[in-house]
Each structure stands twice: as C-alpha cells, then as structure tokens.
Amino acid sequence: MSELKSLIEISRFYGDNPAFVIAGGGNTSYKNSDQIWIKASGIPLAGIGDDGFVSLSRRELGLIESNIYSEDPLLREEELKADMKRAIISPENLRPSVETSLHNLIDYSFVIHTHPTLVNALMCAMNAKQEVEDRFGEEALYVEYTDPGFILFKKLQELIGTFEKKQGKAPQIIFLQNHGVFVGADTVDEIKKLYDKIDLNINSGKDLSLPLSVPEDYNSRTSKTIKQHFASRDLKSRSVQCALIDHFVTSPTQFQKISKPFSPDIIVYCKSNYLFLQKGVEGAQVIEELEKFEQTHGYYPKVVIEEQGGLIVVEENDQSMQTVIEVFLDLMKISYLSESFGGPHFMTPDQIHFIDNWEVEHYRRKVAKDAKG
C-alpha cells in the first residue's frame, strides 16, 4: 500500500534525525476510514520498516474512546490494555503506542508526533504558553502538561472539539507542555511544510545557537573510581566532555538547571534523579556518594555530573550508555535554549512519580533494552 510506504518514509525522515527523535521516542501513524497503522511501543522510528507498525480497527478504537473506565489508575490501565488488544488486527505480538487513541482522534490521514529539541526548548520553558500564542496565534493548540495515555486523550478530546467548533477544522499543530508536538496532515509533504513552519516561527527573533555538543571521552580520578566501582556489578561507565557539558558542570547552581527531567522520555532512559559530585570529592568519598544515592532512590545513578569535570554515565552495555548520553545531552540543550523563553520549566514531583511508576513506560524501556541485546 502506497500510504504505508509513505508512512515508513516520513517516520524514517524524522526518526533518523536526533534533532527530532532520540532512541524509542515519538510515534507516527496513517489511517483510512477503517484502520489505523501506528508505531509499536518501544520500536525506534530510526530505520523502521512495516514490521514496526501495528494495525488496529478504528471501529474498536471508537468504542474505547467512548467507554467509561475505572477511576483507579492501575485498574484503568488493565482495562485499557485489554480493550486495546481487542482492537489489534495485526501483528498480535506487538503493543501499539500508548498514544493510539489520540492519533485516531486527530482528523488527518498522517500524524507525526516527535520531541524536537527546538520545540521542547519552548515547551519546557516558563513562558511556553505565551510564546506559542505570540508565535502561532490561533493556528496551533497548546496543551498544559497532562499525564500521557488515556488521561491526555480525554483532555485533548475536549480541547480538539472546542478548537474545531471555533476554527472549523481540527488543529494541525498540537503543542504539549513538557512533552513535544503532534503534527497532522493528509499528505507527508504538508507534514514537512508544517514542521518547517514550526522551526521558522520558534527561531524568529531569537539566537538559538548552542555551544559545541559533540561529546569526547575524558578521564579523571573520579571517573576511574566510578568505572571500577560498577565493573564489579557487570555495569559499564563512560565519561564525556564538550562545551555544552562544560556550561552546566561549573557549579552546583549551574547543575540545578539540569537537575530534574523535562519530559517523560528523559525519565525512561535516564531516570529522574542525577548525582552531582562537588569538586574535591574523591576516592572513598565518591563510593560513599554512589551508595547513598542508591539507598535514597532505589537505583544506581545512570547520570553523574562531576563538578568542573564532565558527564559520567552508567549502564548495562555500550548502546544503552550511548542512548543515555544522547538523551541527557538533549536535556542540556533544552535547558540552555529555554533561557530564551523564560528559563527552564521541569516536570513536577507528581508528574515524575506517575511516569516512574507507569507500566507502559516500564514496557517501553524493556523493549528498548531487549532490542539492544
């Protein structure tokens, strides 16, 4: 089917570009009157083929959208998973994106949802709402942060309905605070034009250049201590530096600007807490700080910042380490650029807690790890 081929091509176009998507983030879809094809949960858009998509019945999805589910979040999750499974046409061994109902709701053939660095520099800034209104007027829909999944769907169901009554059509650009953007159109060429317009509007009147952000390996006594400490647990460690990292490691004050996650994807790949080691902490003190962190949070630090040193990551294998580096560098870029829009706006503790404990994200993390072997 030519439309599915177009979906694969547009998915790779953005999925292969880390300025739009990193690791397993983002999702894409195509729908006709009967079916929707959507990226499977945890499958990366980069290099995706037709085996990375799940097809579902739009009639069955319509039943989900009108159903009333339990107020208990755990029970509601199980109810939704069961109903979503019934809507699957093929393949039955993959789980469709958690945003499937939202894609089905947006009244365009193609929907491309990504987490661009430039967009999230705005979406994760204090003045996000006002900036969207100033730069896009009534052309785009801005949505304050809402827990993803069914809760976000119900909120957007209402907001999109209101937008359609006012504008006479569904929104083609939907900005989600601390999350990303949904772009909808009936052709992939129009999708690209809309993304270009988003880029142009956000850049307008701003110098959004970044310090050099290509990481290079570095070694210090602290990084060697961390590497040796985790090697005994069959964990790997890598230490990197670049001008962007230098900007945030100069002091505890600078670290505060990258000390919390901006979006759900950051939590999925980097967790929600990061260890800052002040200058002068060495040897046995480093081990004490690592152990204290793990006792406090229940997991080892995937991200360690060495004051006036660099970024140190800890993971299970080389590919996972590379993902953590890419995602955390993106967090740094977002924080740096957000200063042009009022400064960084992190997720709240309640929002972080929801993602940390959400089964959907545990599943997505597991699929990503399994794919890396």
Image (spheres, rainbow, N blue to C red):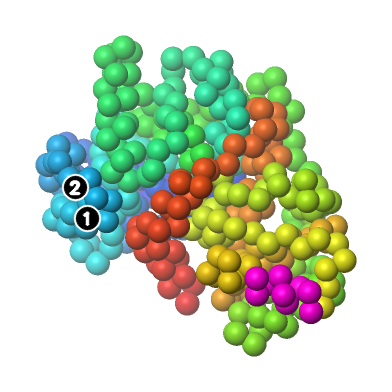
What's drawn in magenta, residue-wise? 284-292
Residue located 76% across and 73% down the image: 286
Question: Disc 1, disc 2: CB below 8 Å?
Answer: yes
Q: Is residue 65 left or right of residue 260?
A: left
Residue located 43% across and 73% down the image: 370
- Between residue 322 and residue 151, name the one nearer to us: 151
Secondary structure type for disc 1? helix
Distance in Å between CA atoms under marks 1 and 2: 6 Å
Residue 322 in the image, given as x and y percentages of width and height: 62, 65
* Residue for badge 2: 70
Tell me which corner region of the image, top left, top right, bottom left or bottom right, holds residue 368.
bottom left
Tell me which corner region of the image, top left, top right, bottom left or bottom right, holds residue 65.
top left
Q: In terms of secondary structure, what is the magenta stretch mainly?
A: helix
Q: 72 above or below 305?
A: above
Residue 158 in the image, given as x and y percentages of width and height: 27, 26
Mark found first going from the N terminus, 1 or 2 = 2
Residue 75, labelled with which disc?
A: 1
Within 10 Å of disc 1 (Cα), the crowding (few <14, some 14-19, many 20+) is few
- Residue type at mark 1 is Leu
Residue 372, labelled with which disc?
A: none
Residue located 65% across and 21% down the image: 204
- Residue type at mark 2 is Ser
- Between residue 141 and residue 232, name the one nearer to us: 232
Residue 198 belongs to magenta span: no
The number of callouts visible is: 2
Residue located 40% across and 67% down the image: 367
